[in-house]
Amino acid sequence: MSLGILLVFYIILVILAGIIQYLLYKSKHKNNNNIFFINMIFAIFLSYVSFTALPSNFTGQKFIAIAWSLIAIFAVIIKLITGKYSMLSKIMLSLSISGGFLQLYFY
């Protein structure tokens, strides 16, 4: 029963990630920072779920989970401070969300 609920949770996360990634790349406004913040919050949430799902002796993988959230935070900082590296920050957000999913599913 609980594995079915977990599968539904994973499916909802994948659908939500697909929607916000689509909105990130298909945004009509160049300075739409709300989508960046939503992506950053989602990436931090994924890394939090990955971090808390690991046992306490898997410290290396826990540091990797923290690294995914730091990549997302740096991507938003790059976007807000410079403004001219918006494609780099979008790629960093996508990498952070993809890495969080890979770590959540395979580790």
Image (tube, rainbow, N blue to C red):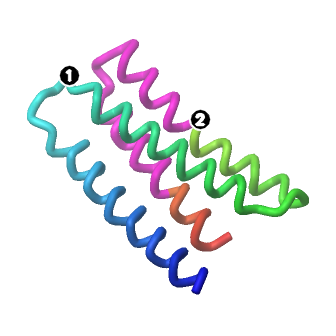
* Mark seen at residue 31: 1
Q: CA distance from mark 1 to mark 2?
A: 22 Å
Q: Main secondary structure of the magenta part?
A: helix
- When the figure is inspected, residue 87 is found, relative to residue 6, above or below; the finding is above
Q: Position of residue 51 (x, y in %)?
A: 70, 53
Q: Amino acid at mark 2?
A: Leu
Q: Start and end of the magenta stretch?
A: 71-98
Q: Position of residue 102 (x, y in %)?
A: 55, 65
Counting residues from the start of the chain, the first of labels 1 and 2 encountered is 1
Q: Name which residue lies at 45% across and 50% down.
A: 95
7 and 101: which one is in front?
A: 7
Q: Circle 1 — which element?
A: loop
Q: Circle 2 — which element?
A: helix
Q: Amino acid at mark 1?
A: Asn
* Left or right of residue 55, residue 20 in this image: left
Q: Name which residue lies at 28% across and 29% down.
A: 34
* Mark seen at residue 70: 2
Q: Position of residue 30 (x, y in %)?
A: 16, 26
Residue 107: name its quadrant: bottom right
